Every structure is written in C-alpha cells, then in structure tokens.
Amino acid sequence: MPAKPSRSNQYKFSLWTFLLGLAVVTTMVVLNRYRVFQRYEFLVSDLRMYWHATPKPDDAIRIAVIDDKSTAELGQWPFSRSVMAQFESALNYYQVAVVGYDVLFSEPDNLDAARASLVDRLEKRGTTRATAEELLGKSNDQAFADAIKAQGKTVLAYSFGTLNAAGRTRGLMEQGFTTDMILPAPLSYNLARIPPGMVRELFGATSYRPPIQILNQAANTTGFVPIDSDEDGVMRSQIMVARFHDGNRVPLSLATLKALVGGNLMLNFGKLGDQKVIIQNPQGETEAQFPVNEHGQLLINFRGPEGTFAHRSFTDIVNHRIPASDLRGKIVLVGATARGLGDRFNTPEGADFPGVEIHANAIDDILQNDVIVRSADDRIERLCGIMLGLLMVILASFLPANLTAMAVVTFGGSYVLIARHMLWESHRLIGIVFPLTMLLFTYVVMAGFRYYEESKEKRYLRHAFEHYLHPSVIASVVDNPEGLKLGGERRVLTVLFADIVNYTGLSESMSTDPVALVTMLNEYMTKMTDRILESEGVVDKIRGDGIMAFWGAPNDVPNHAQAAIDAALAMLAELKRLNTNDPRFKTVDIGIGIATGEAIAGNFGGANRFDYSVIGDTVNLASRLEELTRKFKSHLLVSRETLTKAVGGSYITRDIGQVRVKGKHHAVDVVEIAGHANDGVDPALYSKFAHLTELLHEGKADEARAELSNLQHENPTDGVIHMYAEKFAELKELPREMLFEFDTK
C-alpha cells in the first residue's frame, strides 16, 4: 500500500498562499466599498424574504381603486371634485374608520376655474360677489372640502420636491413646489428623541407641494408620499420621517394610522441603535411600535403580489354598490391602479405594482407588528465578511484542500443559518452576499494557488524520479513528499545487483570508439532498467556497467522477493534477445545477485543534496552474491530467504549450499535460479544435482562422488559442478552440508 501523507505535510504553512489570501481579502473589501455587490444583495434579500408563503394581510384594510371601470363610468381622471365629494360622502355613509388618499390635490378643480371667471363677470355687471356665489352654488372644491370635514378622519397626501440623506436623493424638483409653509402645517411627530449629530442621517426636504388651501384646511391631517427606491430601482422601503421646516414630517401611511388612533406619534433615535416609531392612543398607551433604520426607513414586508389586499372599485363606492358591512370600520386607502394613470412602481412582488398598495403593505406591517429592519449601513456584513475572509486565509494557508473545503461549507452554512435566524426570529435582515462571496472567492483563489503549488512540486518530484522509479512508486513518493527528508526507516525488502561479466575487457576492446561503447551501454541500461521498473522496483544506482535496485521501499510491494526474481529473469531474457539480434551484444553476459532481509531505507547525504537509497547487511549480501556468479559461472544467485519469501513463484532452482562471503560471519544458503518452470529450461541437470545433494545429506560419500563424476562428465562447462569437484578433491571426508568460503574482493 502507498504510504500515507504525514500530518506535518498536511498542515504545512504556505507563505505565498497566505500573502495571496490577504491580497484577495483587500481587493474584496475595496470592491465592496464601491458597492459592487449591492445589486446582488438586493436580489438575494428578496429571495430570502419571499421564498416562502408570506403572512396574510389584516382584514382591516380596503383599497378604493381608481380603475378602468371607474374611468369608464365616471369620466376621465382626474374626476371632478363634485364626484370626489360624492365619494367622500359615500365613505361617511359607510362609516369607514379612516381615509387615506394616495392622490395629490395640488390644483383647483377645472370647473371651479370657470365658475370663478363667471363670478367675476357678474360682479362687473353690478351683482355682488356674495350674491353671485349664492346664485352659482357651492364650488366643487368647497363641496369636497365639506365632505372631508364631515367625514372627519381623512388624510390627504403631499409630495416633496427632493429628499436628501447621506448623499442620497429621492424625487425631483418640479414646477408648482413651494418652499413656504402652507397652514395648517403637515403632520409632524409630537415628540422626537434624536441625539445630537444624528439629524443629518434623516432625509430632509426644502420644498413641497401641498393640497390646495381649502382642502388642506378641511383634512384631518396630511402626509407625504415618498419615492424611495433602492439603487437597482426597486422600491422596498418607505421613509417614515423627513425633516422639513424644522419639523419631523410623517408619511401618508403613518399619518393614516395616527388619524385612526387619534393619539401621539413619537420618534426615538437611540445612540445604541434603538431606532423606532411609537404610536400612542389619547390615553398615552402604546398602540403600536416598530423599528426603523438609521435614515428613518421602514423595510416593507410585502404580503403578496398586486391584489393581495381587498380592492373595491371607486365607482362602486360612489354608487353604493358595496355592502355596508364590507367597509364599516375599515381603513380605506384611495389610489389609481389603472395602467394608463401611472402611479405604479417596481417592487420585489412585481415590476408594475400600484403605489397605493405599497402604503397598504406598510400599514399592515405596522398593525401586525411584522416589521423587518434593514440597516442602511453594511458594517455588520462588512465586518463578518472580513472576519470570514481572514479566517479562510489562515486555514487555507495551513490545511489541505479537503479540510479547507469542509471549513468553507461549515462557516458559510453557519453564517447563512445565523442570518436566517436573525431574519425570522429577530426580524433583522443582514446581508449574506458579501460575506459568502468573500469566503468562497478567497477559498477558490487560495485553493487554486495551493493546488498549483502542490502540482508544481509534484511535477518536480515526478521529473526527478521518473528515470529511477516505476510510475506507481513515483505516485507514492509524490503523495508523501515528507518522506524526502534526511533519515530512514528499517524495512524488510529485496535488493538486486547486476553487473556485466568482464566489462573491463569489453570496454578495452571498444576503446577506439568510446561513442559506440556509450551507445551500447545506454541501450543495455535502458532495457535492463525498464524490466526493473515494470516490476515496481526502484533503480537505486547505475555505476558504469552495474545496476543496484530494490523492492519494498518507499512503497510496499506485496511480494517483493518474487518481483525481484521475476525482474532478474526478465533481464536475462532481454539480454538473450540482445545476444541474438544485436551483434554488439553477442558476447555480453551478466551476473545477478539477489538478497532479502532487513535494511534501512531513506534519504542519505547532506542537507542540500541527498539520495533515496537502502543500506545494511542485506545490501552487502546481494552485492556479494552478484560477485559469486563469476566463480560459479552462474547468471542468477539468490539467498535462501529470497526464494522462501517468493510465495507463488514456480522456478527451476539448484541449491548450491552454504557460502561464507567476505563480511559475513555466518554462512548463507545460496540458490541458483535457472528460470521459470515453464520457460523451456531442461530440468534434468537440476534434478540430478538435487540427487547429489540428497546423497550428501544422507552421508553416502562414495555414491555422491560417483554422481558428481557423472555430472561433470555430462556437463563439463557447468561452473557449479566444477566448484563441487574442486571441493570434493580438497576434502578427504565429505560433509553433510557443502560449505564454500570465498574472498569476493
């Protein structure tokens, strides 16, 4: 199994990643300063507020709509004030609680202008003005004013020319606006607690367009109708207070509630954000209170699309077609809804939403105590975004990608849940776009850079090892670069040494053409190392004509002994093909020694230059076995432990006996491997040799000598038999175990 990355590598600090993260956070803060994310915040906030079913509106509100049916029956809008007088009288008949007009009456009635001209003419002809007015009857405006007085709780609307606050402007200056106060003055808060220095945060106006004098005096009160859309042109809020002529003026919706309750209005701007409007009854008891933001704005929690509130046609009310119970005691708001009459706005609930229904939503929010606060300042979102960004910078500089991704999901999900809880439990809307964008963008940039850094490091490691390691081994090293530090670990592995026999003579014979020698040697090394790499071995060293390789480190090889033997046989088979097909290799022969046992695998060298290698007694034994191949004239010698651990391998072998090599105090059982059982190797020789060793084990010396003589006669060039014959000649009495001692130097 590949080695697992160490914890120290997983939590490796990356300075460049950290610095890049700080740059990303700074960039995001600057972009937020220029309100780049604001439009997206508005859209997301709308989804958060209206993705589920909204509360049903209070049944206390009715909207008298000036619709297409009304203009078809009563004539072109604006209607004559005589019609308005009939409408107001009908509302008085229906005993409505309060009337709020989202309609401006800033110009006299058109017919009243003609009436005034006729009065002037009669006066010129000698008729007194009083007589002339008595003859012509009451003016339309007067009739409307009288009906308003009779109703008693009618609120008329006026508009401001401009509204300014903290660099924001609402509305446009138009002809007909005046800077002078027309008495009675527009409704103001009875009491306003505003700490010094906070007045500048409220919207302020310098001019307004009031109802005509006769209607202004007849109304219970007046309230302004603001145009308060956000930067994306969508109307989500309503201004609840505007400074005008040193008074804190009240909008139409709040003025309507004031007329309904009949008490006082209080505006409280606390230093700690306790910003709210309080509506009191005549006894001084609080009937309703709701929060507003730093600019005195109320975020409207829309109840639904157009038509959510009960609509009653203006003409049906004039002609008494509405049941009396439907309007009795209700708040009636009057406004135009016909498409051709304007007064429609872009809202979260629709792009063509009637203005009068915006007031209805604001009133219903207050009545149901369902007001959501949206701060005019994004300092909370900005602070949270910066904190999340910096936290991500720190984590992404230390943690691996998978843990960093988990942190993003955890922090992002937690912030969304907190924001959701604040919205529906605390009725406070805080933005999520900037904090989440900061979190995600910081993660994406840093994770991408971290991935690039790690990929570059892995590419470097792969390039450094691709000539020495099999791809699977490279993957193991790349996944665990921590292993490339100085030091090592004790492991059981298999080591191979291979060398060209009589390389010195070969090089001398080709000394006149060194290029040809190098070319031949490169091709030989390529073929041999390819066979080693194919078996997941590590090519440790190539020195001249010699190769050192090992199996079992740095990654585990399940059966490294068998892998090494199979690689050695593949090398010999490859050399045989070269002997046959390439004249340069006709006389080339190699010897291979393999040993299995404990060794220390790791990086050895200096701090700035080191090699991954193995050291230990097993390495020395493999080297000695390779050298013994020359004495035994054998191609492949392995230790008994190697053959024992080669589980599953089927080979034709020959037990040579015990060999005491230089540097070893104890003899080692050495085995010659001739090939795989199915490679076509004639097993006769090896069977007879096995019989010879059995005779030795059984103590049958004479029979052993006779068997050896036969083998020597049949195989005069066999090196092992020749070595046994020399040993037999030296010894007077044959031992049960043949022991060879060689000085391999």
Image (cartoon, grey):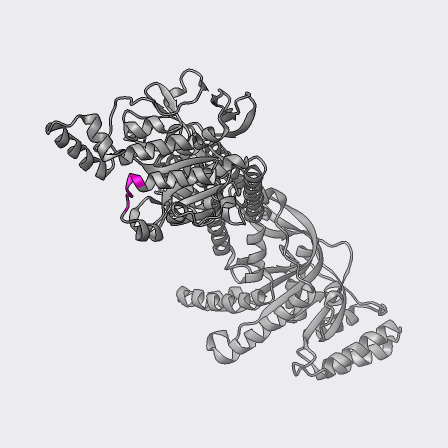
Snapshot quadrant of residue 404: top right
Q: Quadrant of the C terminus?
A: bottom right
Which residue is drawn at the image coordinates 60% and 52% (left, top)?
Answer: 613
Snapshot quadrant of residue 64: top left
Q: Is residue 699 left or right of residue 352?
A: right
In terms of depth relative to the viewer, which is nearer, 693 or 49? 49
Where's residue 467, x and y in %? 50, 59
Give the tally of numbered discs: 0
Residue furthest top as drawn: 196
In terms of depth relative to the viewer, which is nearer, 509 or 450? 450
Residue furthest left as drawn: 125
Where's residue 263, x and y in %? 49, 24
Q: Is residue 132 left or right of residue 642?
A: left
Where's residue 604, x and y in %? 59, 46
Q: Is residue 226 magenta?
A: no
Q: Is residue 516 left or right of residue 159?
A: right
Which residue is drawn at the image coordinates 75% and 81% (left, top)?
Answer: 711
Which residue is drawn at the image coordinates 12% and 27% (left, top)?
Answer: 126
Q: Is residue 510 left or right of residue 207?
A: right
Q: Is residue 81 magenta?
A: yes
In terms of depth relative to the viewer, which is nearer, 227 or 638? 227
Residue 297 seen in this snapshot: no
| Vertical order, 74 against 180 (above or below) | below
In terms of depth relative to the viewer, which is nearer, 705 or 272? 272
| Vertical order, 160 against 268 (above or below) | below
Residue 219 seen in this snapshot: yes
The overriding secondary structure of the stretch rendered in magenta is loop
In the image, which residues are magenta? 77-82
Q: Quadrant of the N terminus?
A: bottom right
Where's residue 409, x and y in %? 56, 46
